[in-house]
Image: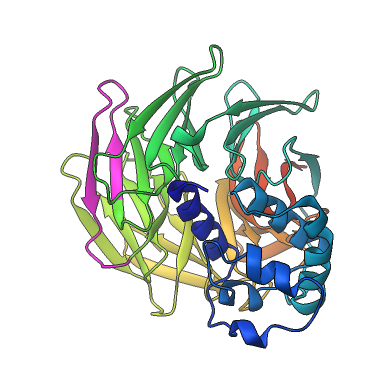
Amino acid sequence: MGCKLRRGFLLLLGALGWNAPLAAQDQLPAGQGRDILRADCTFCHDLSRITQSGHTRADWTIVLQMMKNAGAPLRAEQIGPLTDYLAQNFPDRSPPAVTIPGQVRIAIQEWTVPTPGSRPHDPLAARDGMLWYTGQMANVLGRLDPKTGRFTEFPTGTSLAGPHGLAEDKDGKIWFTANFAGAIGKLDPNTKQLTAYPMPDARARDPHTPVFDRNGILWFTVQNANMVGRLNPQSGAIRLVSVPTAHARPYGIAIDPQGIPFFVEFGANKLGRIDPVSMSIEEYALPNPESRPRRIAIGNDGVIWYTDYARGYLGSFNPKTGRFAEWPSPGGPRAAPYGITVLEGAVWYSESGVKPNTLVRFDPKTERFQSWEIPSGGGVVRNMMATSDGELVLAESGINRVALVEVK
């Protein structure tokens, strides 16, 4: 497997939660799949990344398919014994979902994407009604017509490997971060032509989340390089700046009503604000030092909302007053709130740490929650987006699906 894909696979393992201190190889339980695990699952990571993770058998099947897509040397006859071994010895330990009733009704429709192990990462609701997603581990961009259920896949190739975040420009072109290739990509859906914009700094290996401002400038985070960047589509010029806090891991990013980019620092308890002209960064410390905000959404009133993945909280910040507010998520401290958006004044987000995953609605006026179980289980909803007609589109990475939520 190429070094860029190896690096991408390491990022995948970390995102799956394989980062805790791990047992040594000689502490692996006995079983038919142990030798396969030792021989074929250590080509780019330590076994300790696996032994403290937990999944259902179905989820382990999807994980192994993603490993194969990333280049793991697994033969077809090894998949069954290895899946059985992992499911028996490293089962799912997620807490059960907690749902809160309320007055809002929803209907969730889900579709399985064509390529197994694609790991749909981010969704996009295009202006023409099409739903897009990034097939990160299959190196494809996917497009779904929700009226017909028809999928179209657009291969990105290894030069734009690991498609991650998505954004649409005013001309209907689809832009994405090539997370494993250290580049920004642009797709013309009509001609299928791809254009690559490599990062000008070799350290910026993993562009993460993109968003357009009202002037058509593309802003993006570069998580592990600790940078934020902007790309001018007219000239192709890219400028990068480093985040003041070391190891801040800039993650989700959004534009406020005044055109100012804000982002969250997943490696710290901070939000960041970027001056769109000078690109100077101002940081705001969250109230709790243990907070680790992962995604961000901004309402029409300019209030910033974030999911505190580490503590299981929903938080808000008002830049006008400097005031923070936080609420414990219904699923508790291990709920792992993740993808988030604002729709018609209400805040919607996912809880990725509970089984099944939940979709949560929070009303800022009444400060009341309502939540629903995602029918398929969700498989970690890493990002979501509101559509122009008042619905939600979700990417369900762990179960290879995308979903559309009708809010009634």
Can residue 69 be seen in the rendering of this structure?
yes
Judged left or right of residue 258, residue 143 is right
- What residue sits 49% from the left and 53% below the top? 6
Residue extending furthest top? Answer: 191
Can residue 320 be seen in the rendering of this structure?
no
Judged left or right of residue 172, residue 238 is left
- Give the colour scheme of this rendering: rainbow
- What residue sits 64% from the left and 31% below the top? 142
Is 121 drawn above or below residue 326 in the view shown?
above
- What residue sits 30% from the left and 39% below the top? 199
Q: Is residue 240 magenta?
A: yes
Judged left or right of residue 105, residue 262 is left
Q: Position of residue 315 (x, y in %)?
A: 49, 66
Residue 236's quadrant in the figure? top left
Is 49 drawn above or below residue 126 in the view shown?
below
Residue extending furthest left? Answer: 278
Q: Position of residue 91 (x, y in %)?
A: 77, 75
- What residue sits 57% from the left and 77% below the top? 48
Residue 407 or residue 379, whichever sits in front:
379
Quadrant, the C terminus: top right
The magenta segment is: 228-247
Q: Position of residue 304 (x, y in %)?
A: 43, 55
Q: Position of residue 71 (x, y in %)?
A: 60, 49
Is 192 drawn above or below residue 10 in the view shown?
above
Residue 47 or residue 120, whichever sits in front:
47
